Amino acid sequence: MQEDRFPGHRFLPYLLILPSAAIIIIFLIVPFIQSVQESFFTTNPFGTKTIFVGLRNYMRLFASSDYHKSIVTTLIFSGFVIMIGLSMSLAIAHLLNQKIRGRGFYQIALIWTYALSPAVAGTIWALMFAPATGIVPYIVAKLFGGYVLNWMTNGKLALLVVSAAATWKMLGYNIVFFLAGLQNVPGELLEAARVDGATGWRTFWKITFPMLSPTTTFLLFVNMLYSFFQVFGLIDIMTRGGPGDATNILVYKLYRDGFIHMNSGSASAQSFLIFIVISVAAVIQLRVATRKAVYSR
Amino acid sequence: MIHILLILLVAVIAFPVIYALITSTLTFQQAYSYPPRLIPGNQLWTNITQAWERVNFGRLFFNSTVISVVVSFVKIVLALLAAFAYTHFRFRGRSILFPMTMVTQMLPLPVRILPTYHLMASFHWINSYYALMFPFFASTTGILLFRQFFMTVPRDLSDAARVDGTTPMRYFLQILVPISKTNIAALFVIEFIFIWSQYLWPLIVTTTANMRVVQIGLKMLLASEQIAPEWNVIMAGTIIAMLPPLVVLIVFRKSFAEGIAMQSEK
């Protein structure tokens, strides 16, 4: 691991790391510390005076029903994107992970949604669900005796549609990683299970799934980051947090409070709370990843 | 049997984009016909020119391309250098610096967004390429990817180079980088798509139409409608917006898949 392949070059390694480290310190670590600092202050409406308020920004958030609602919306949204998205992707990857003709074609034909941006996905799904003219409301009206499907007025439906759009966009990425993970499951192991008379279903849950755990944990983390942050463009294009606050997930609320209502204290407190959730998830992810490394030695 | 299932899956997943493609070929009236029209029209070129002119798409496309290519390139170079240091040298502070690099995974833009914005303002970088590029230059993914690969490079290779009197930097440039081709291509795909898709940051740090990026162009197209969304024009814009990353993914698909596979095995 810690090798010294070129002894005697004392300054070179620092020089090599310097550009990355400088970027990380200047644009990531220092702003983050400032953000934590700002969360203990409040600025008057004219932006002329900054007052120390201790934990008041946090207290306000904890007491705010808007914030509670945003947390619940985020949980539903992320839960949908992660659970439905990962199960579907795993099923598709599993289906694809066998000797079939045209595998290369299927592979690219199933993963290309990875290249779409959340904003593009949002625009296309907004078209499909466009009230009165989109294809989906049309099909629903045909099937359910003229039922009017309008996600622009129905909050629950809006949340479902943005969740489905976000999940669809992420399928490609998830399939790529599940496929790579599945290809690393030793064939002999599966063969042995088959010879012993284990069913496909049992083999999958007893052997394949546990062996995939580093991939699954990694994807859980990536999908969490995706559904927390990267979907911003999708939400902004499709619903802008509405109707009402139905799709106002945490990152969108943060943007509104920080850049539209100019409430930097509250926005910084929100940033810090999101950071705590992310870092807990990151630590769990790293733990699982390193545990695997130990096993495989 | 399995082919029927797979073809069905391919079709279902592709359907939204096929529908978007069809819509981009229709006239405004056709896009609003009831039942929805699923037969392509012949207005694709008209719609593309419309979208292009309406929000100055050419300029946005140029901005997005420059940003995505430059940022991906810089990220790859910085990650290669850092990974080289972490795998080939022993130095003091390594045990602090490496975890620090990893911690940045926990610091996505939204958890530091206001101060980063203020930093741009204090550099007078608002509405400039600098603001759109600099905060993205560090790549944890890249450092991890190259580090993992460099650790598998046999020691004999560097030993031979050292015995021959090759300097570390020459060994890096003439041996290490060339054998990392697959990983470089894989990282290029990942970073290009990542940067091309950025939305929140360009939205807040750019203020004039000529500094906007393609993703924001979509928002502008959607907002520029007077009465009802001109889906035919909007979809033409959407198709343009999705092409470059799609081309990058398809061109480098082999290296991309191999790079990911290498990454997942230990």
Image (cartoon, coloured by chain):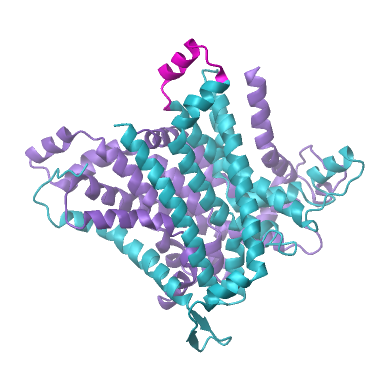
Question: Where B9 sits versus B172, above or below?
Answer: above
The chain coloured purple is B
Residue at the spot x=48%, y=64% of the render?
A: B111
Query: Chain A hue?
Result: cyan
Residue B241 on image: x %, y %: 59, 50
Picture quadrant of residue A108? top right
Residue A121 on image: x %, y %: 64, 48
**Image quarter hosting the N terminus of chain A:** top left
Residue at the spot x=47%, y=31% of the render?
A: A210
Q: How many badges with numbers are in the image?
A: 0
Left or right for B71, reference B197: left
Q: Residue furthest right?
A: A145
**Image quarter hosting the C terminus of chain A:** top left
Residue A175 on image: x %, y %: 54, 35
* Closer to us: A138 or B233: A138
Magenta range is A184-200
Residue at the spot x=49%, y=71% of the render?
A: B114
Picture quadrant of residue B221? bottom right
Left or right for B160, reference A98: left
**Is residue A21 visible from the viewing direction of this image?**
yes
Picture quadrant of residue B51? bottom right
A199 within the magenta span: yes
